[in-house]
Image (cartoon, rainbow, N blue to C red):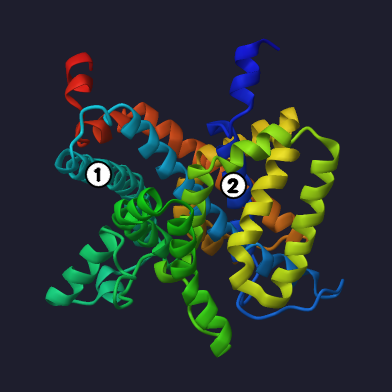
Amino acid sequence: MNQEDKTTRAIFSKDDTQIVKGIAVIMMIIHHFISNNPGLPVTLSFDNRKMVIATACKVCVSIFMVLSGYGIMRSWQHTWHHHSHEASEKKKVLLYCKFVYNHIVKLLFSFWLIYLMCMLLFLMRGGVLKNLYGSGRQGVLYLMKDFFDLYNLYEVTPTLVGAWWFMEAIFVCYFLFPVMNLILEKGKIIGAIVLALGTYSPWILYQIRQGFDRHTDRELFYLFSFVLGMICAEYDLFSMFVRYSKVLPVKGLALIVMTGMFVIRCRYCLIVDPFFAVTVIFVSVCFFSRIPNVSELLKSFGECSSDIYMFHISILSIMSGVSFVNDKCKVAVIIFFCWSVGLAVAKLKATVHYQQLVNRCLIKDRKEVKHG
């Protein structure tokens, strides 16, 4: 291995990110396959293994949030590196606006294609828009809220797929990113601590009030995971995982820490998920990223994880009435089917040059326009 390869391998790469996303999206399917309440403590026992696995797989949400915070922070660092020499405070604000706008546009376009596909499937299965969204102006308003994935904002309104709340949470995190990043920039370590404590406080109150049946699928509860990802990017913690991932004692420590987090998660549930998510990422880097065939398969899942997230509920709904030998076979087929559809959607996007359409809607730098 040459010096360049060593340098490349010493960072938490895009491939590493996709592998972790692949793990998270499989966990998400398992979590939604088995009916469970992830906010309730579970007993660790062999007889209760399905519920233990199903509730623990809820960590997928925090994993996606941590990776989203990490990704946008890395993207901003790259953007700022190329503009810091010429940007005044006013230009920095404009740069933030363009940066957030571009990220939201990319997110919306990835959502709209799946929304239209799910809508077509809904109508083909005999669904009626009037029954879903209502009639008149209110029905149109609810449809538009759902089309822009804002159905979970302020008050919950009718939606085609309930699992889409996560996209709206990401929108909110993207909007708040400039403010949160400013706190990290100006406050350094103190800023990171204040931001972390402030965004974790909803979970602290949740635990104090013992409101385990409360609906927590809101951005308020997952801001901390996003901030945790930002902090990991700011202090390059994931790259540190990569650098020490080949050291045998570190591998053992990673497994011990994740097992400990898993046990604590069963007792204290959702409030542990952000930290549990980081340990899953740590173990992924130590093990799954090192196994050639497994890493390639997980990477493939990760590359279409966004699409799988958006349509997997529809597939679960279709497959719910299909009988299998046992649940293990059924969930394996569903995972394979979701992956296959994800690959088909990726192929469709490439065929219709979907990314080119998205690129036309982005605000580009003058240099990009000149050379594009």
Image point 63% across, 60% down: which residue? 275
Secondary structure of the residue carrying numbered label 2: helix
Q: Which amino acid type corresponds to the residue marked 2 in the rendered image?
A: Phe
Image point 32% across, 74% down: which residue? 158
Which quadrant: the C terminus? top left
Circle 1 packing at 10 Å, graded few (<14), some (14-19), many (20+), is: some
Disc ID at residue 127: none
Circle 2 packing at 10 Å, graded few (<14), some (14-19), many (20+), is: some
Vertically, is 48 above or below 186?
Answer: below
Secondary structure of the residue carrying numbered label 1: helix
Q: State the residue position of label 2.
A: 337
Vertically, is 82 above or below 131?
Answer: above
Residue 216 appears in the picture as rendered = no
Labels 1 and 2: the sequence-earlier one: 1
In screen coordinates, is 260 left or right of 333?
A: right
Image point 67% across, 35% down: which residue? 242
Which quadrant: the N terminus? top right
Q: Which amino acid type corresponds to the residue marked 1 in the rendered image?
A: Tyr
204 and 61: which is toward the camera: 204
308 and 93: which is toward the camera: 93
Q: Position of residue 89 (x, y in %)?
A: 19, 42
Name, please, the residue furthest toward the left: 137
Disc ID at residue 96: 1
Vertically, is 348 above or below 156?
Answer: above
143 and 271: which is toward the camera: 271
Image point 49% across, 68% down: which residue? 197
